[in-house]
Amino acid sequence: MPATVSKRYIVIGRVQGVGFRAFVKRVAIRENLSGFVKNDSSGCVEVVAEGRREAIERLEGRLRTGPPLAEVDDLTVHECGSPVETGDFHIRE
């Protein structure tokens, strides 16, 4: 069975108002990940995702560029020690 990992990302840059959350949701669903994406009050986007290691790595690569109108300046990554989400990947308001 493939290794399952959980990670929390903070995406910094021009990432709000450019379709970033919908972009992340599409990628995560395609990769069969569970978790969520949400805007942070500081202007960042937070992503928490869980799934196969390879799928998480592909998501991380996509987070580094984002959708066409986004400008990602930095991406912080935190390993989560235990499962964080169950079910589908969703956008939190």
Image: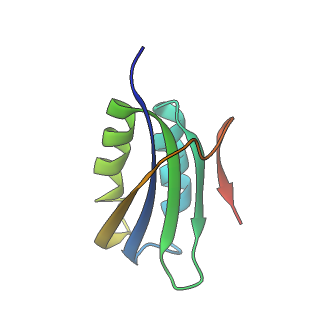
Image quadrant assignment for residue 77: bottom left
Image quadrant assignment for residue 91: bottom right
* Residue at position x 51%, y 65% in the image: 46
Residue 19 visible within the image: no
Looking at the rendered structure, the number of numbered marks drawn on it comes to: 0
The quadrant of the image that shows the C terminus is: bottom right
Image quadrant assignment for residue 22: bottom right
In the visual, does 13 lie left or right of 36? left
In the visual, does 63 lie left or right of 18? left
Residue 51 visible within the image: yes
The quadrant of the image that shows the N terminus is: top left
* Residue at position x 53%, y 85% in the image: 42
Where does residue 30 sit, x and y in percent of width and height?
48, 32
Judge whether 59 appears above or below 91 on screen: above
Where does residue 10 sit, x and y in percent of width and height?
43, 68
Where does residue 20 sit, x and y in percent of width and height?
48, 62
* Residue at position x 58%, y 71% in the image: 39
Residue reaching furthest to the top: 1
Q: How is the image coloured?
A: rainbow
Where does residue 57 sit, x and y in percent of width and height?
31, 41
* Residue at position x 33%, y 49% in the image: 60
Residue reaching furthest to the front: 81
